[in-house]
Amino acid sequence: MQTPTANHLSTPVNRGHAFTTRVLPALFIAMLFLLPCGLQAGVVRVGNPAAPRLGANFDIFALQGLNDSGVDSPAFAVNRNFEFENSIGVTIDLGGGKLKDFGIGLYQDAAKVTNSTGLEVIYDQPIFASSATATVEDFDISSKDTFFKVGKVEPRIALLGPGNSIFAIATPADIFPNLVATAAGPGGAKGDTWNINFAGLLNTLHLADTAINGFILFADQAAGEVANSDPYLLVSVGNGTQVPEASTSVLVCVGATLAFFVRMRLKR
């Protein structure tokens, strides 16, 4: 497995904690979600990182310590079933052997500094940003609301480019118009489950579609939100459309060119 290291949540920055090799087979990682670890009823800690299902082309990392100074570090574990069945959250290491099961939101560390947890999705190879998909839940809003609730947790999203550097951060104002209501799954936050429209988010950010290595879901701290917040949760992530490797792209272009000339000759 990869070894995460502290980094800076700023633009740009080298995300050195992202994986460069994978040691655990996908089957073993997926099985981790089935193994309880002697914690409170219902919540299952599944390691850090964790792959949510067989066939996934990404890993999910749990992060803690995200704050205005930009520093983050690995959390203790990704967890499942915090507040809602099959939700994906973060288990925080508060130090001194004290762990806290949580979602994505604001908390205070041992020094009473407010930080955010986060879930980082890293793909095996770059995907088109517009093809990224993620479903989140539990903002305590409905389709009739015009924005997130004052003082309640609000999301931010960091898009990761080459070297897993952050090249864009979407604010709550960018994200809200790109939330699409969806039916909640079993045990989910009924009427409060949302697909993030990444293609729309790129338009809101005035960005052309581009290759990304992944993204980070975390919590905003700029609009009066307070710790310890009622966090939001990740429900699922999609594989996305992988960007062809350079050699493959060349072959595709050559093949298309040859096909064009063949068609032209046949027309003569």
Image (cartoon, helix red, strand yellow):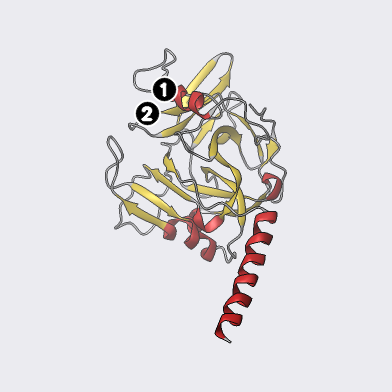
**SS for tag 2?**
loop
What is the quadrant of the C terminus in the image?
A: bottom right
Q: Residues within 10 Å of mark 2 (few under 14, many from 20)?
A: many
Q: Residues within 10 Å of mark 1 (few under 14, many from 20)?
A: many
Residue 59's x, y, as percent?
Answer: 55, 36
Res 119 visible = no
Residue 230's x, y, as percent?
Answer: 41, 36
Residue 7's x, y, as percent?
Answer: 70, 37
The answer to whether mark 2 and mark 1 are in CB contact below 8 A is yes
Q: Which residue is mark 1?
A: 44
Residue 34's x, y, as percent?
Answer: 40, 22
Q: Which of the 4 image quarters holds residue 42? A: top left
What's the amino acid at mark 1? Val
Q: Which of the 4 image quarters holds residue 23? A: top right
Res 194 visible = yes
Is residue 268 left or right of 151 when viewed as pictured?
Answer: right
From the viewer's perspective, is residue 160 above or below residue 262? above
User: Separation of disc 2 and disc 1 at Cα?
Assistant: 7 Å
| Residue plotted at (33% across, 33% down) | 84
| Residue plotted at (29% across, 44% down) | 184
What's the amino acid at mark 2? Asn
Q: Which residue is mark 2?
A: 81
Earlier-in-chain disc, 2 versus 1: 1
What is the quadrant of the N terminus in the image?
A: top right
**SS for tag 1?**
strand
From the viewer's perspective, is residue 125 above or below residue 211? above
Q: Which of the 4 image quarters holds residue 39? A: top left
From the viewer's perspective, is residue 35 above or below residue 184? above
Camera-nearest residue between 169 and 248:
248
